[in-house]
Image (cartoon, rainbow, N blue to C red):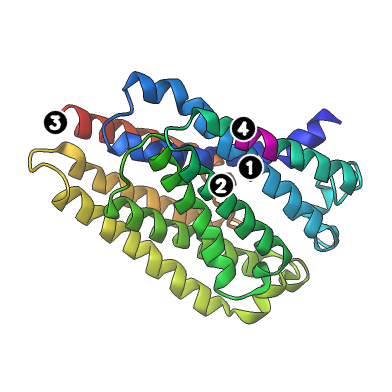
Amino acid sequence: MIYDYIQLCRPKHVVKSFLILLPPFFGKIILVPQTLRTALFAILSFSAVAAAIYVINDVADVDNDRNSSTKRNRPIASGRVSIPKALFFSAILLGIGFTMLVFSDNIIANFVLLLTYLVLNIAYSLTLKNKPLIDVFVLASGFVLRVYFGGFWFDVAVSPWLFLCIFCGALFLAFGKRRNEMLHMSPPYLTRPVLRRYTCQYLTSCYYLFCGLTIVFFSLWTVFATEPQSMFMYTIPVVIFIVLRYNLIIETVDTSGDPIPTLLGDKLLVFLIMFFLILSFIGLYFS
């Protein structure tokens, strides 16, 4: 029973909340004691609200999930957790998430961001997931809101370069997810009706468009937005390799394209991301 509730929270997706640490990391304050003291509360706050959204989404999608060969085993779709209990659990998670805001440096701003994320994703679960392009932009907005949540939480500005990289990178992942759902879900329209409004060629072109833009914006950021002597620019080949490795997995492995299982399921990708963070740390903090 406890495992079912843990599964409802999709614990692997907690990784997304580490985007909250990007503003203090690139703002060079990640080692400041105040940042270290409140980082866990920041991650817990957004993760709890995100988990509540996952539960609400599973309740809204219960009929479609029962038609899916993979999603039919989810706790709500399988009947292991009833809908009333799931909604009560979601309310508890929301309470935890918003309560953690007392540790924020900008409580009101972070409250507005969390509320925006909540309302936007409830609207997604109810109707926006069936609107072409809007569905993808809502998915991408979650990544961007996490970054700005971290900026307000730690009272550090989010640079335009970081915004461009995260925004384009999020669209890259979102279009890749939709593309692979169309390719590998059978039949895709039963579990994702919006796919009737797309073509595989269109999703593929958008996927590679934002793939290229992500690399370009990151490269420009490292070259023009940091000190001339910074080693940060030498992370560019690592980022390109990470993107190419991700593309290879998406193209050759039978996967839905969900970015978190794809990233965590490949040891080389995990190593490359850790290597990128170490190089970035050295380049930003010790140049």
Name the residue carrying label 2.
114
Measured along the vertical axis of the image, is residue 83 above or below residue 15?
Answer: below
| Alpha carbon distance from label 2 to label 3 | 36 Å
Decide: few, some or many residues near mark 1? Use Cα within 10 Å; few <14, some 14-19, many ≥20: many
Type of the residue with mark 1: Val
Type of the residue with mark 2: Leu
Decide: few, some or many residues near mark 2? Use Cα within 10 Å; few <14, some 14-19, many ≥20: many
Label 2 element class: helix
Measured along the vertical axis of the image, is residue 85 above or below residue 218?
Answer: above
* Residue situated in front as seen by the camera: 150 or 71: 150
Mark positioned earlier in the residue sequence (4 or 1): 1
Question: CB of mark 4 within 8 Å of CB of mark 1?
Answer: no
Dominant SS type (magenta):
helix
Measured along the vertical axis of the image, is residue 44 above or below residue 221?
Answer: above
| Alpha carbon distance from label 1 to label 2 | 7 Å
Question: CB of mark 1 within 8 Å of CB of mark 2?
Answer: yes
The answer to if 98 sits in the magenta stretch is yes
Name the residue carrying label 3.
287
